[in-house]
Image (tube, rainbow, N blue to C red):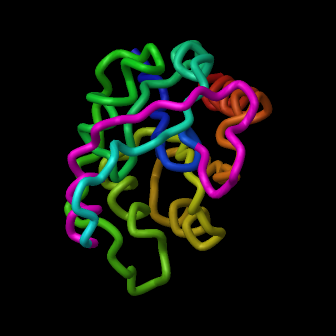
């Protein structure tokens, strides 16, 4: 039986837009008690950090589940994406990439996630949705991943949009023919 492709999901940018003043249309504001966020704020000298504000679109959970993919969190949120965001989006518990290291500099200028995602995919076809993907990541994946792969760069100010869901559905249909 053929496996469905993986959909590697970043949070900040694609799922939770940022870098704008006004909340995007269709999104709701949530305050999430992320321990990672809290510790980063404490480390910066903030004495009583507020929970992290995130904007989430409640239609994205059902739309992601309707896609013919196995969903995977590919985010620095790691297990906290399941803990804090999945319930707000109506998503079940998802596997997550437990990064060996984060935010490191790659010797070839790749995004810090690129090599680890290819390893995690273990030759399976995958689509990677992120706001920080560069052309060098797409080229490296094409040269080093034996399966099919789609890299989809999302504008962090707007998050996933209807055309992205269409592109993901079309690509999955194309590779399963």
Residue 150: image x %, image y %? 61, 47
Q: Is residue 137 above or below residue 67?
A: below
Residue name at image x 33 percent, y 47 percent? 50
* Image side of residue 156 versus residue 105, left or right: right
Residue 34: image x %, image y %? 28, 42
On the rendered image, what quadrant is the N terminus found in?
top left
On the rendered image, what quadrant is the C terminus found in?
top right
Residue 85: image x %, image y %? 39, 29
Residue name at image x 39 percent, y 86 percent? 107
Q: Residue furthest right?
A: 163
Residue name at image x 41 percent, y 39 percent? 124
Residue name at image x 67 percent, y 23 percent? 173
Magenta span includes 156: no
Which image quadrant for residue 62? top right
Q: Is residue 103 above or below residue 157?
A: below
Q: Residue furthest bottom?
A: 107
* Image side of residue 150 versus residue 31, left or right: right
Q: Residue furthest front?
A: 47
* Image side of residue 101 versus residue 81, left or right: left
Q: Which residues are magenta?
A: 17-44
Q: Is residue 11 above or below residue 62?
A: below
Return the residue nearer the eye: 161 or 4. 161
Return the residue nearer the eye: 171 or 49. 49
């Amino acid at each position: 039986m053929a496996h469905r492709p993986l959909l590697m999901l970043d949070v900040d940018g694609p799922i939770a837009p940022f870098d704008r003043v006004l909340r995007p249309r269709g999104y709701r504001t949530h305050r999430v008690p992320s321990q990672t966020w809290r510790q980063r704020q404490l480390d910066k000298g903030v004495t009583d950090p507020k929970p992290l504000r995130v904007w989430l679109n409640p239609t994205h959970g059902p739309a992601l589940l309707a896609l013919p993919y196995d969903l995977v969190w590919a985010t620095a949120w790691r297990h906290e994406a399941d803990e804090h965001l999945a319930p707000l989006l109506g998503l079940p518990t998802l596997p997550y990439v437990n990064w060996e290291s984060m935010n490191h500099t790659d010797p070839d200028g790749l995004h810090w996630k690129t090599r680890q995602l290819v390893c995690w995919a273990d030759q399976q076809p995958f689509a990677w949705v992120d706001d920080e993907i560069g052309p060098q990541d797409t080229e490296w994946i094409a040269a080093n991943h034996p399966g099919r792969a789609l890299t989809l760069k999302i504008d962090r100010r707007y998050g996933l949009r209807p055309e992205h869901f269409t592109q993901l559905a079309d690509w999955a249909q194309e590779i399963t023919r």
